[in-house]
Amino acid sequence: MTEWYEGLTVLEQIYFWVGVVSSVALIVQIIMLCFSSFGGDFDIDGDGDIDVDGDSGVSIFTLKSITAFLAVGSWAGLLTCSLAPVELHWLSAIFVVLCGGAAFAAVVILMRAMLKLQYNGALQTDKLVGKRATVYVSVPAARSGRGKITLNAQGRYLELDAVTDGDKLITDEVVEIISTENECTVVKRVEPKTAEDATVGGAE
């Protein structure tokens, strides 16, 4: 190993050490991401992101994407140098940019896809306003306590906390969501005109 390293040019040694450090950093980030996915407490977003956002709201220049660029690019540069004569080692810079850029783009695309999945799985409470629901647990009058309502919205069955500004709402009453506050819905009584209006969950 020592003889191999001593036989490297200065440029190859730079590629080698950049590759080692960035690869270790990339592995650590992957491990942290895995722990975070399984409910760990690692703050993988606190990575010194440069505030340059794409259309999806994901920062393009992040520690993860830059590390991927350096790791893949440096190993590609070292491989190119090992295959090319010394006088052509300058060509390795082209492969560093091409291979590192591909890794950079792959990380950005992956993070955008993960964010999109997370966004799609999150409940968008603002879109619940105007929906009709059914009282599941009676809602005390004048916001003196919380009850629960049920409805079908955003492709799922929901059971949400609810308060009302009016009179007490009893179980199985049809209500309308007029706002959402502090992870709780504010509802009002709806007098159904037809049996269809009283259907649990209402139509979206």
Image (cartoon, helix red, strand yellow):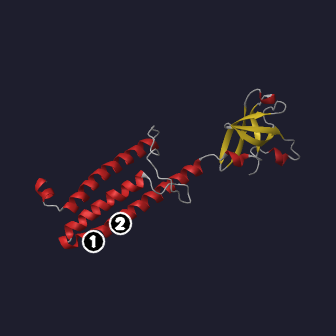
For marks 1 and 2, give the CA distance.
10 Å
Q: Of residues 188 and 42, which is closer to you in this image?
A: 42
Q: For the residue carrying disc 1, how many other residues have a C-alpha within 10 Å: few (<14), some (14-19), or many (20+)?
A: few
Chain-order first, disc 1 or disc 2: 1
Residue 70 lies, with reference to residue 152, above or below; the image says below
Q: Position of residue 100 (x, y in %)?
A: 36, 62
Of residue 97 and residue 174, the one placed in the foreground of this image is 97
Q: Which mark is residue 22?
A: none
Quick one: which residue is furthest to the right in this view? 193
Instruction: State which quarter of the image contains the N terminus.
Output: bottom left
**Where's residue 63, x and y in %?**
41, 51
State the residue in front, 73 or 161. 73
Q: Residue furthest left?
A: 3
At label 1, which amino acid type do we have? Leu
- Describe residue 14's horizontal placement relative to residue 202 as left or right: left
**Residue at coordinates 27% horizontally, 60% vertically from top-left?**
75
Q: Secondary structure at mark 1?
A: helix
When the figure is inspected, residue 138 is found, relative to residue 64, above or below; the finding is: above
Q: Amino acid at mark 2?
A: Val
Residue at the image position 79 percent from the left and 36 percent from the top: 172
Helix, strand or loop at mark 2: helix
The residue depicted at 29 percent of the width and 60 percent of the height is 74
Residue of label 2:
97
Position of 172 with respect to 114 (left or right) is right
Label number found at residue 91: 1
For residue 164, what is the image quadrant? top right
Label 2 Cα crowd, 10 Å radius (few <14 / some 14-19 / many 20+): some
CB under 8 Å between discs 1 and 2: no
Query: In screen coordinates, is 184 left or right of 7?
Result: right
Residue lying at the far top of the rendered structure: 144
Q: How many numbered marks appear?
A: 2
Location of residue 174 in the rendering, given as x and y in whole percent from the top left corner: 81, 40
